[in-house]
Amino acid sequence: MTPPDSATEAGLDAASNGMALPGDVPAARLDGISKSFPGVKALDNVSFDVRRGEVHALLGENGAGKSTLVKILAGLIRPDSGRILLDDTDAVFHGPRDAQRRGISHVPQEVQAVPDFSVGRNMLLGFERPFDRKGKLSSKEREQTRDALNRCGAAFSESALTGQLSVPELRLAQISRTLLHPGDVIVLDEPNAALSENDAAAMLDRLRLLRDQQKAIIFVSHRLTEVLGIADRITVLRDGCAVGTFPRAELDKDKIVALMTKTSRLADHDSPPSGTFRSSSVEATNGRPLLEVDGLTREPNLADVSLRLHSGQIVGMAGVQGSGHGHLLRAIAGVDAYDRGLVAVRGHALHPGMIRGAYRAGVVLVPADRRASAIVSQLSVRANLTLPIHSRASRGGIRRIRRERQLAREHVEAFGIRPSNTEILAGNLSGGNQQKLALARALVSKPDVLLLDEPTQGIDVAAKAEILALIRRLVQEHGFGVVVASSEFEELLAVADVIHVMSRGRLVETFPTEEADYERILHAALP
């Protein structure tokens, strides 16, 4: 992978201004870090540091390498090359406990808690001594956890059950947990992604308190407005390389977007050119829509979202982490209820939060987490393909094994699933072939509306191109409508007929695909 070219001279000058001063030893420094996964170079000779008493923002589009970098610092994965230094001393982590012992606290994107445990007990998980009680908090434990909650400005009790807390309160408890053990480096990966604007603003106030307590904070976020309001320095990653480190005062949203998108990924054949898989003419969209969504609202994830989908059309929903584009698909499919609004298929309104009703109306969702939700990993390819309720392999509720095998062979061939052995466990397939199996499973029931949540997430470039071509071919052959929610904007440009952009739960822009480009979508998607 070629590092960014000299087109960012001004930015690189700013980067030099952001380097540590003599005698100003960073709390943590990553020096020349590289990491590769099969088919992907996630990080290429990246250097990064964070000082005490600062918030250092780490920015980049999806796939830029942000999560890989913070996971290396948190001890979750090991780099292929490079050094980790804490207070200018080399550190080697064999796992997350090593990182914790050396003072690295990691708050992941997901809110993690045991709902039947108290807040204090959740905060202490992993730090108990052999004879500590696992239930009621001791007086010393109450004092420790209460002090940490107070330092973060939390108003709830350390004795409250976490299952009774709101998402913002759970997130605050996660951050409070970082204060319970020695160490000054706190890594926050998208801490505000699931929060409303008011809750996110309150969270930023808490981070300012921690900064004033001389904590070194690494802040990963897609919300540029928040970053520009709290960060002292900003490092931008692009295609696994560090573009540079900049004082906050030298950047604005336009400059950040330009830095994130400067290098053309298309020139390196990382993605298909725009329009590669779209038909030369999109079916006319006059007449009654196949799917109507009007004013769909579910706080804080969706706010007054409306869209139309016609037969033979692919509608793209572009968004970054926390935009709500995945929540929209779950609401349409009946997985999540919503507060108000309307979802109708062929003019018939669906009841909120009723999966069976949506399925009977012809709505099928292929979720983003294919291993956990879209396929059954411990069953064979054949068994996966014959699970749907409306499978043609059963009659009167009685399985027909010969028909199952025939149906499985037909779908394996039609979808190009490899290997072609229908008795292999689904979990043993590659990521791309698992996604093909998930699509095949969805098509067994002959849906009218197919909802695809991040259909190319975590698969290699060649498999992505295959999946995109397959989606377009299926639409052309079967005439159903597809809504694709994705943070991979180049792929939406390649396959969608129209692209809606979501940000903070709202639909903020709509582009006919021929009028859209990557930078315009990214600019609209970043709040």
Image (cartoon, rainbow, N blue to C red):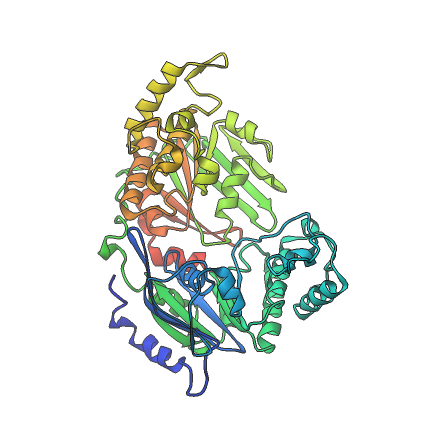
The foreground one among 257 and 349 is 257
Outermost residue toward the front? 131
Residue visible at 51% across and 49% down in the picture = 324
Question: Given the current orientation, which residue lies at the most extreme right position?
Answer: 139
Task: Name the quadrant containing residue 336.
Answer: top right
Q: Is residue 216 above or below residue 275?
A: below
Q: Is residue 107 above or below residue 510?
A: below
Q: Position of residue 121 (x, y in %)?
A: 68, 56
392, 25: nearer the viewer:
25
Seen from this angle, which residue lies furthest top? 396
Identified at 42% across, 85% down, the residue is: 21
Q: Nearer the viewer, residue 236 or 345?
A: 236
**Residue 252 or 93: which is nearer the viewer?**
93
- Residue 174 in view: yes
Task: Tell me where residue 219 appears, x and y as whole percent.
Answer: 50, 66
Q: Give x and y (percent) for residue 132.
A: 69, 58
State the image quarter where residue 208 is shown. Answer: bottom right
Number of numbered callouts drawn: 0
Q: Residue at x 38, y 82 (%)?
A: 17
Residue 294 left/right relative to 14? right
Viewport quadrant of the N terminus: bottom left
Percent coordinates x, y for residue 443 in the rendering: 39, 28
> Looking at the image, is 333 positioned above or below residue 191?
above
Residue 349 in view, yes or no: no
Q: Is residue 200 above or below residue 353?
A: below
